[in-house]
Image (tube, grey):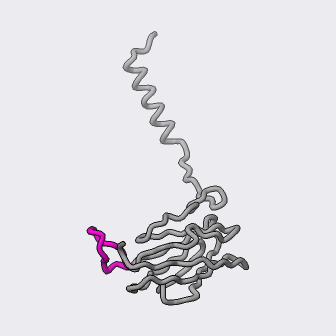
């Protein structure tokens, strides 16, 4: 007895649906050693992201240039502050400490991420800061420029 092509197609469709439905769904786990989230900074002056190598504390960018405020849609200064994000490449417990407090406010670090809000100022300012993970320390800088040249 021969099976018609329509029945064969219906049977294969049912088998495919049942096999996909019964297969276990595994959610991939994020592994900091294998999956690098932040491998290089974005060099953005209005939304800066700085990546820090856990082994060497090399910051990318090393001397980050940021605006004092974000530009608006017409590339003019807005009233929105610039927020800087630092990420440890492998999730190390990164700490940031500014040696000169005139550049940022609201500095907060948790695990492999730190965030700070740039202070609004009208002139070009350079501020040194300290990156530390464990006993290692390094002193790069942030350059705050008036928006939006």
Q: Nearer the viewer, residue 24 or 34?
A: 34
Question: What secondary structure is the stretch in magenta mostly built from?
Answer: strand
Position of the C terminus, as image quadrant, is: bottom left
Spot the residue most to the left: 74
Q: Nearer the viewer, residue 144 or 34?
A: 144
Q: Which residues are magenta?
A: 69-81
Q: Residue at x 48, y 89 (%)?
A: 102
Magenta-colored stretch includes residue 41: no
Q: Nearer the viewer, residue 148 or 60?
A: 148
Q: Nearer the viewer, residue 48 or 5?
A: 48
Q: Residue at x 27, y 68 (%)?
A: 73
Q: Where is residue 5 drawn, in percent x and y?
A: 39, 17
Left or right side of 143 for 111: right
Q: Where is residue 82 drawn, in percent x and y?
A: 41, 76
Q: Is residue 89 above or below residue 79?
A: above
Q: Where is residue 132 drawn, in percent x and y?
A: 65, 78
Q: Residue at x 54, y 42 (%)?
A: 23
Q: Residue at x 49, y 39 (%)?
A: 20
Q: Which image quadrant for residue 129?
A: bottom right
Spot the residue most to the top: 1
Spot the residue most to the bottom: 101
Magenta-colored stretch includes residue 70: yes
Q: How many numbered badges does the structure rendering display?
A: 0
Q: Where is residue 98 drawn, in percent x and y?
A: 56, 85
Q: Is residue 46 above or below residue 19?
A: below
């Amino acid at each position: 007895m021969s099976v018609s092509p329509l029945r064969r197609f219906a049977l294969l469709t049912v088998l495919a649906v049942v096999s996909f439905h019964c297969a276990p769904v595994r959610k991939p786990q994020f592994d900091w050693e294998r999956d690098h989230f932040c491998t290089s900074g974005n060099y953005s002056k209005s939304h800066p992201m700085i990546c820090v190598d856990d082994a060497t504390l090399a910051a990318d960018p090393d001397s980050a240039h940021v605006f004092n405020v974000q530009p608006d849609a017409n590339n003019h200064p807005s009233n929105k502050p610039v927020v800087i994000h630092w990420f440890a490449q492998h999730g190390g417990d990164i700490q940031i400490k500014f040696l000169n407090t005139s550049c940022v406010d609201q500095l907060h670090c948790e695990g492999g991420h730190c965030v700070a809000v740039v202070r609004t100022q009208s002139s070009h300012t350079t501020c040194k800061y300290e990156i530390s993970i464990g006993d290692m320390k390094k002193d790069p800088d942030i350059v705050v420029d008036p928006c939006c040249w």
